[in-house]
Image (cartoon, rainbow, N blue to C red):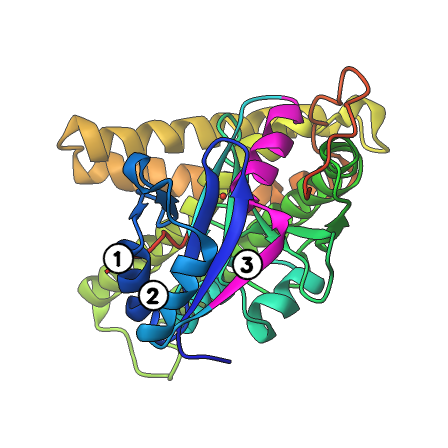
Amino acid sequence: MAEAQIILSYSRESGIVATASGERYPWAHTALAESGFQRDDDGVWHLSADGTQTTVVDLVTCAKRHRTSVHTSSRRFIGDAARDLAHLLPGQWNSSVEIYSHPAWQEDLVPWIWDSGELGRAVQSERIPYAALLTDAVQGTTLLFIERPGSQLDYLVGSFSPEGLEGGYGDPHAPRSIVLPPFAGRAAQALTGRYLPAYEQAVHARQTAAIAAVLGDIRSEYDTWQAMNASGRYSDATPLSAGVALGTATELFLGHAWRRFLTVVDHAPALLDRCRPVSSPWPDDAEVLSRLADAVIDAEKLVDEIVHGGFVPEQERRAREWSAIETWLTDGEMFLRQARISAPHRRPALSVAAPARSLTAARPAHRSP
């Protein structure tokens, strides 16, 4: 592959558009600028109003002088395809274009792709010079939308890791990306009917697992702390030197436990909202879930007071931290069994049959020099 390439595609709004690719992509930028193209904020090049007389032959000739090859895509501009799809999805979805001119830029995607399927493999092994992001403005879901490598028509869509749940490619809870057909209506139906429900279930399972892991870690540390109190010795059998050492050990335990407990504060509210103990095998869990919810609410208030409200007396802070942690250590297993049998709320379905408009005939931000 040439060190610098220009990829041309057609946009219904802008006409011919171009993207630059390759380790020597600045050569392509120079050729495009000399040929009358102008770059927008997304890194896509458009013919300027006074550059309408430029032809593909002119561009090819100029590109050769700058050791750049020119390729014409058989697909419509990916920004148009993503925008058509976003307009048909229920809710408030936005689209934007990402340009990965230098191959190394694409590598920045790898830690953030939350996928167990073809998209994750493609990002790691195939050259992807551009993509589009689909973002749910209400729920914050961000999807990566790319042209499927090796296909002249299809697309791939998968997700980025949800905020606070970094997992990356290979996470056992990650959803599997799907292939989208080259028609906006059918693609929207596949996305809302198949992928997004699977994504929401994966997020639910990942949140539940994260809370289970945190509570397990805190429980282990709590048991060690209790054993130390009972024995009067550190875990390495060194004697505790009366109250000062014990107080220091208690403070260290509580500080570390609280930092871990913030994962519960972040993710438990959504899971608690989905639990329906009355219709579960354990209807009496309702009272327990209410106590757990109250503990999370007070913990959220404490965090807000510390961050925005200024000083919280140390004794009060410790008491409130300990109360929330102790409540969840006591009853957390009841929450987990309810969360594991509950289901995320379904997103709205497509209200009408979407037209089969062709898509073919936008964590890591776009980078530009």
Q: Which label was assigned to residue 345?
A: none
Q: Nearer the viewer, residue 165 or 326?
A: 165
Q: Are marks 1 and 2 in contact (CB under 8 Å)?
A: yes
Sort mark 3 into few (<14), some (14-19) or many (20+) by Cα contacts within 10 Å: many
Identified by mark 1, the residue type is Glu
Sort mark 2 into few (<14), some (14-19) or many (20+) by Cα contacts within 10 Å: some
Q: Would residue 72 be counted in the magenta stretch?
A: yes
Identified by mark 3, the residue type is Ile
Q: Residue at x 40, y 55 (%)?
A: 364
Residues in magenta? 70-90
Quick check: can you spot residue 262? yes
Q: Earlier in the sequence, mark 1 or mark 2?
A: 1
Identified by mark 2, the residue type is Cys
Q: Residue furthest left?
A: 311
Q: Which residue position holds label 2?
A: 62
Q: Element under label 2? A: helix
Q: Which residue position holds label 3?
A: 113
Position of 47 with respect to 358 (left or right) is: left
Q: Residue at x 44, y 38 (%)?
A: 324
Position of 164 with respect to 350 (left or right) is: left
- Nearer the observer: mark 3 or 1; the answer is 1
Q: Which label was assigned to residue 34?
A: 1
Q: Would residue 112 be counted in the magenta stretch?
A: no
- Separation (CA) of disc 3 from disc 1: 37 Å
Sort mark 1 into few (<14), some (14-19) or many (20+) by Cα contacts within 10 Å: few
